Amino acid sequence: MKPKHLLMSACAAAFITGTAFAQTPSGVLVVAKNIDDIVSLDPAQAYEFTGGEVVSNIYSRLIQINPSDFSKLDPDLAESWTVSADGKSIVFKLRANAKFSSGNPVRPEDVIFSFRRVVLLKKPPSFILAQLGWNVDTIDRMVRKTGDNEVTLTIADNLSPAFALNAIAARPGGIVDEKAAMANAKDNDLGNAWVSRNSAGSGPFVLRNWRPNEVVVLEANPSYYAGTPKTRQIVLNHVTEPTTQRLMIEKGDIDIARNLGPDQIDALKGKTGVKVETHPGATIHFFSFNVKHEKFRNPALWEAMRYLVDYDGIADKLMRGQFKVHQTFWPAGFAGAVTDRPYTLDVAKAKDVLAKGNIPAGLAIDMDIINQAPFPEIAQSMQATFAQAGIKLNLFPATTAQVITKYRARTHEAMLLYWGPDFMDPHSNAKAFAYNTDNSDGNYQSTTTWRNSYMPPAAISAQTTAALAERDPEKRLEMYRVLQRHVLKESPWVTTFQAQWQYAIRDNVKGFVHGPFADYVRYDKVTK
Amino acid sequence: MRGSGSVLKVLALGVITLAITLLGLLVCTFVIGRIMPIDPVVAAVGDKASAETYAAAREALGLDRPLYVQFWRYVAGVVQGDLGLSTASGRSVAEDIGRAFPATVELATLAILVGTMLGVPLGVYAAHKRNRWPDHLIRITSLIGYSIPIFWLGLIALLVFYAELGWVSGPGRIGTVYRYTLQEWSGFLLIDTLRAGDTGAFRSAFSHLILPATLLGYVSLAYIARMTRGFMIDELSKEYVTTARIKGASEARVLWLHALPNVMVPLVTVIALSFGHLLEGAVLTETVFAWPGIGLYITSSLFTADMPAVLGGTLVVGVCFVALNKLAELLYPLLDPRTRAT
């Protein structure tokens, strides 16, 4: 083909296809994000990152964690609440003007129905409310209507009311429109199948469309008690490839890119029209040893490992802003967190500890890792630093589902993983890292302790239980600080980093809130 | 009567062959799914579910039953047109595939058109200029299409034609502005936008489609051109070609009217297989271009051990492969009279 013809063809193609569109429609916020983790959009079932984010924007709760100060609770559907003198019950006064998107008023019956269905459906997040002592037999007497606009919740003995409030403010506390759900119920599912794919909430948005692995569209709820959001539509586009997200935000085809790696973030810094934002996340990263294996039972090995991670190198050079060094189980920025970081890379010290602990030379460790960034990069760094102390780290990358399957079965030697709290209360992590009273194979627990076959000293498990019951808020936090400091030094795992959320956003977009985890990603104040 | 009986016999044999092929496909996929070290219940309920929730989900998914019972129930459902529910999302697999598959068909069809319309002439020309520079150039171009990872090629193409030059639209199937105004009828956006008479939406859909389709077309082109060249070189060495040249037929006539029709039978098989591979789903292309097609659907499902979704997707792809092979076979008598006798 002659150059002239080639040019003409290119011009014709450009004419036919049009040029790339340079901005998203006004009133519509377009977000690029991996949304393949959505299983359900029912607050009684949603337990994944994206599902949790969507549910949190559709369903109001009685109370919410304050997005600026995580130690405070804000009213949501409940305009006020009172804890009884004995701390065993909490009375919630409902807002008079709140309506569901269907137009139905929010009633005490809806609150009771919502909590009851979480307990009866027994879906993954149900354990959060079950911790309050609510089960099939107790729910009807523990969650009651006590006035025209009033609900009283009773909690189990030995529970701190602060813990109960934090649990109620979590995702399964989303209030569902009983009339809408039950009108679409089938096979005694309390509307679960329908609510999984439709909206029955009173939050700022309603679900317009969810196509798995394609898109989620939220539309402003005109009935929202706090006023209709200014952005009429939120579109979560399924884009998995970070480089693709980067190109799209540069072109203005999306307003927010949510899954960018350090390379994409670096490339976007200083670009016109795009800002890079960083917020602390609630996820902590760690590696652990399964003490079912004899070779991992020596505490000297646990201590030596703490000196064999290049914490600063990984945080500064590999993750470049997406991780910060954090060595305790409760993330920095949350009430009660301990930010001590006594360990740095010190190969000589590690060798000394190994020698004093009579750890045989040439120890080989098989470590399972998730085969996606950042795990292989971190693992390779660890492989190099472990080798300096004569420890051979064999890496076994696999999909997340494969790794978790093995972890759950306790058939691993070592794991490189992460942990996110289920709700904003230190007990969520304390139970995972500092409690195990029954290590038998038949007593499956999703805790880090059980899954690594580790039983902390009885006093530590007892302290975790006592902290859960402590009514004095400051004393309670102090108990969790003691637990963190103990686990920091004496446990078969090493907490290494706290994740930070980094995303790119067009500079005309204001009001987007990205909290520490999915429950606190909010779109209702967005303007552009 | 004998003739119609014979046709019926052929048809019956075809249906039985198809059924056995698909059953074999399902057995293999099912067994692979079960020996994978992934627990589908964990994939469905997450890693923090309690033992009670886990047990309830296992029972609800039917995974507490013996393997042969699970398989039998699945096959019984398929026979009745029910592909089951996704274990990961609880949604109808048929519904999900019904949405993903048209996206792939649309992409694959344009890609195979590009691949064939360019690959066949290039292959013929390369054979004509055998061992001279145009042949070398075409062979190198084909080799590049074969060798460069499509994932990398896709990102570079996006960078150049979308981000830098702005000639085409970016990832996705259509612009956000049209996504919810367009009434989808067939799932094929080019058809739906034309049917709706929405020129802007058509331009947007075409603008999103052209780059991934051209890239996939290039990969098909590489294969088709190489195969065409090989077939043509063999054909051009035959005596009837020499005779035609001696009788004064122009080179174009020899190439296009004498030799090419005689390689159409193997060529159609090559094109059908290429189309089949494209329908199987260009996973990496679909990932880079955020194209919600069947390849991405099956791969994502495989990673979460969502076996009803994997089996459903595999079944659809298998049916397409068999159908394309059968279609190619049906075309043989039309393309080559010598095959009619058999």
Image (cartoon, grey):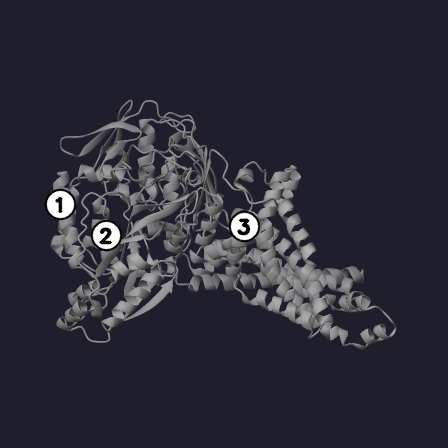
Q: Residue at x 24, y 27 (%)?
A: A80
Residue A187 image position (x, y, % from top left): 43, 40
Between the C-alphas of marks 3 and 1, the distance is 55 Å
Locate residue A220 relative to residue B341 in the image: left or right.
Answer: left
Residue A155 image position (x, y, % from top left): 21, 37
Residue B250 image position (x, y, % from top left): 83, 68
Q: Can residue A435 be spotted in the picture?
A: no
Same subunit, labels 2 and 3: the answer reads no
Chain of the residue under label 1? A
Q: Secondary structure at mark 2?
A: helix
Q: Residue at x 48, y 58 (%)?
A: B71
Which amino acid, by three-letter code, is at mark 2?
Ala
Q: Residues within 10 Å of mark 3 (few under 14, many from 20)?
A: many
Q: Secondary structure at mark 3?
A: helix
Q: Is residue A199 above or below residue B71?
A: above
Chain of the residue under label 3? B
- Identify the image quadrant of the N terminus of chain B: bottom right
Nearer mark to the viewer, of 2 and 1: 1
Q: Can residue A310 be spotted in the picture?
A: yes
Quarter holding residue A403: bottom left
The reply to whether the C-beta atoms of the residues labelled 2 and 3 are less than 8 Å apart is: no
Residue at the front extreme, as displayed: A4
Q: Nearer the viewer, residue A168 or A479?
A: A479
Q: Which residue is mark 1?
A: A478
Q: Earlier in the sequence, mark 2 or mark 1?
A: 2
Locate residue A166 relative to residue A118 in the image: left or right.
Answer: left
Q: Which residue is mark 3?
A: B162
Between the C-alphas of marks 2 and 1, the distance is 18 Å
Which amino acid, by three-letter code, is at mark 1?
Glu
Residue A163 image position (x, y, % from top left): 21, 40
Which amino acid, by three-letter code, is at mark 3?
Tyr
Quarter holding residue A202: top left
